[in-house]
Image: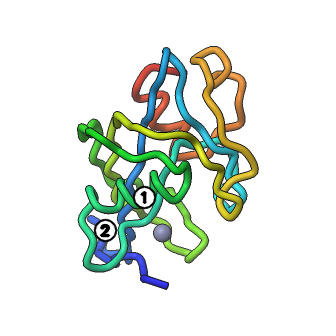
Amino acid sequence: MPKPKLGKSKDGRDMHYSVGALIKKDNKFLLIDRKKPPLGFACLAGHVDENETPEKTLIREVEEESGLKVTNYKLIFEEELSWNWCNFGIQTHYWYVFECEFSGNIVKDEVESKSIGWYTQEEIKKLKLEPSWEYWFKKLKII
Ligand SMILES: [Zn+2]
C-alpha cells in the first residue's frame, strides 16, 4: 500500500495532502456515502500518495471510487484545513479541489462507499455531509 505524502502545516504539525473531485451532471453532484471515517456524504476524494501529483491522485481516486475516467479538470480550491482528521490520526490536510468532466459508467466501490449517486442542490442541503465537504459546499454556495 502506498503511503500518503507527508508535509508540515503552517503551524508545524504533520500534514497530509488531499484531492477532491466535484463532478456534476444535469445539475446534480456525484456523492458517496462514506464507509470509512470521517463518515457522511462526500464527493470523491483521497490522499495524495508519496511521489504523486495532485492531478494523478485525482485521476486515480475518481477511477477507484466511481469507475469514471476524468477527461478534463480545473482546480477550484487549494487550502489547508487544520480541523480535518483522517483515519491515520492526522489533523491537517492541504486540499486541492478540482471540478471534473468525465466519461464512462459508474461502478460502485464496495471498500469506500455504502452508496454512490447523483444529488441535487436541494437534496444535498438535507444530507449529513462529511465535514470537509460541508465546508466546500458552503464555500461554493451550494448549501
Ligand atoms: Zn490524512
Residue 69 vs 47, above or below: the answer is above
Q: Residues within 10 Å of mark 2 (few under 14, many from 20)?
A: some
Please indicate whether residue 93 sits to the left or right of residue 41 in the image: left
Helix, strand or loop under label 2 = loop
Mark 2 highlights which residue? 9
Work out whether residue 132 or residue 116 is closer to the camera in this orientation and state it.
116
Res 130 quadrant in image? top right
Residue 62 is situated, as x and y percent measured from the top left of the image, at 45, 51
Residues tagged 2 and 1 counted as in contact (Cβ below 8 A): yes
User: Seen from this angle, which residue lies furthest front?
Assistant: 104
Give the residue at x 58% y 42%: 106
Q: Amino acid at mark 1?
A: Ser
Residue 121 is situated, as x and y percent measured from the top left of the image, at 57, 17
Residue 26 is situated, as x and y percent measured from the top left of the image, at 49, 16
Instruction: State the count of labels.
Output: 2
Q: Which mark is residue 63?
A: none
Rendered-image quadrant of the C terminus: top right
Q: Which mark is residue 82?
A: 1
Residue 77 is situated, as x and y percent measured from the top left of the image, at 29, 40
Please indicate whether residue 78 sits to the left or right of residue 117 in the image: left
Q: Amino acid at mark 2?
A: Ser
Res 14 quadrant in image? bottom left
Give the residue at x 26% y 56%: 55
Res 50 quadrant in image? bottom left
Distance from disc 2 to disc 1, alpha carbons, whole Å, reads: 8 Å
Work out whether residue 84 or residue 129 is closer to the camera in this orientation and state it.
129
